[in-house]
Amino acid sequence: MSLHADLSPETRERLASQRRWSTITSLLVGLLTTILMGVILFLIAMAVQKEEIPELVSYSAEAEDDETQKIKKVQTQVEKKPAAPSSAMARVIAANTTSPVAVPVPEINVPEVSIEFGDGEGFGAGWGSGDGFGSGGGGSFFGQKTSAERVLYIIDYSSSMKSQGREPLMRKEMKKSLDSLVPGTKYQIVFFSGPAWVAGNQVQHSKDRRGATITDGSKKFEWTGKGAGGWEPKGKKQVPEWLDLTNLQLKKSQKIVKESKLSFGTSWKGPLEMAFDMDPLPQAIFFMTDGVSGKESLDIAKKIGSRARTKGIIINTVSLMEPKAQEAMGTLAKKSGGQFTIVNKDGKREPVDFK
């Protein structure tokens, strides 16, 4: 026999409400307990992992007064020692300075670098021969050699070159000389008769032969003269520009040398002075003529030769089958520190020794 107690609806609802609150209360208590345990564990972990922070000690040098500070010059001396396979201690040099933090400077063992070039004497065969301009350029003309990196040819293209076989000899030697130029050489060619012009320009004399016009593309340059000699530029002067030694440029220059026509007059001063207007200046000049520049030839040679020496320009001269030009040409070469060669009628060369 079982006993049943019938509960009223109000009672059932009250019991259900109590169950819900009990469940909610249990959940809240569990959540708060979990959070509390997490906080406690976190604090314990932090206490365990806490490390003692080392104290940072700095040393500060007493700074000098700004007005009394001086910059000390550090002199580095290199002592040549025989090259050896052993290594030495390289010292690390630290400069004294004021710093908020003391930084230790370690000593590092590094191999000592030898500054020797070997056991031989010097640099081998030397830096070149001739005029002392190194191995970056050079060439030869009528047996005269130069190692200059900038070479200027000043060549007589006057009408008198037609006689005694001078013209073909000159053109042949010019081609040969251009072929002898060392790669890296810069060069230029100036022709002269009465006026002077850059090789390849056009020359037009006036009917009275007391003037000439040089045409260089769209540019024109005027010259005036007094017969065969005494020629000077009138107005703006032409300034030759250096040419790079390329195969194309070399063939072009040789073609110009071969085909350019001879002209009237012989005057030295104009073409020689053109050399001093070039930028940079030539280091060596090959100056060849078959005649004299009037009575003033010797005076021109003395003045130009002395001026060339002060500028570091060496003028090598060639007197082509003209005995009258030998004194002035020799003076020009000697005063500038150059070479002088006489070419006789049979083509034989006679280098002149100034010693």
Image (cartoon, rainbow, N blue to C red):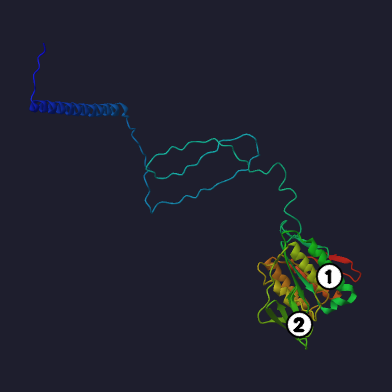
Q: Position of residue 295 (x, y in %)?
A: 79, 81
Q: Earlier in the sequence, mark 2 or mark 1?
A: 1
For the point 77% across and 74% down, the residue is: 191
Q: CA distance from mark 2 to mark 1?
A: 22 Å
Q: Is residue 251 visible to us here?
A: yes
Residue 141 seen in the current view: no
Q: Identify whether 239 is placed above or below 13.
A: below
Q: Residue 48 sits in which quadrant?
A: top left
- Callout 2 crowding tier (Cα within 10 Å): few <14, some 14–19, many ≥20: few
Question: Of 267 and 11, which appears nearest the observer?
Answer: 11
Q: Is residue 273 above or below residue 103?
A: below
Name the spot of residue 305 as percent of width and height, x first: 73, 71
Percent coordinates x, y for residue 83 in the rendering: 65, 39
Secondary structure under the numbered disc 1 in the rendered image: helix
The image shows residue 31, relative to residue 273, as above or below, that is above
* Residue ID at (14%, 28%): 21
The image quadrant that residue 353 belongs to is bottom right
What element does badge 2 sit on? strand
User: Does residue 59 appear to the left or right of 211 in the view shown?
Assistant: left
Q: Quadrant of the C terminus?
A: bottom right
Tell me which amino acid carries mark 2: Gln
Residue at the spot of label 1 = 171
Q: Residue at x 80, y 69 (%)?
A: 255
**Nearer to the camera, 253 or 269:** 253
Q: Residue furthest right?
A: 346
Other residues around mark 1 within 10 Å, as few (<14) / some (14–19) / many (≥20): some
Task: Provide the residue designation for mark 2.
Answer: 204
255 or 81: nearer the eye? 255
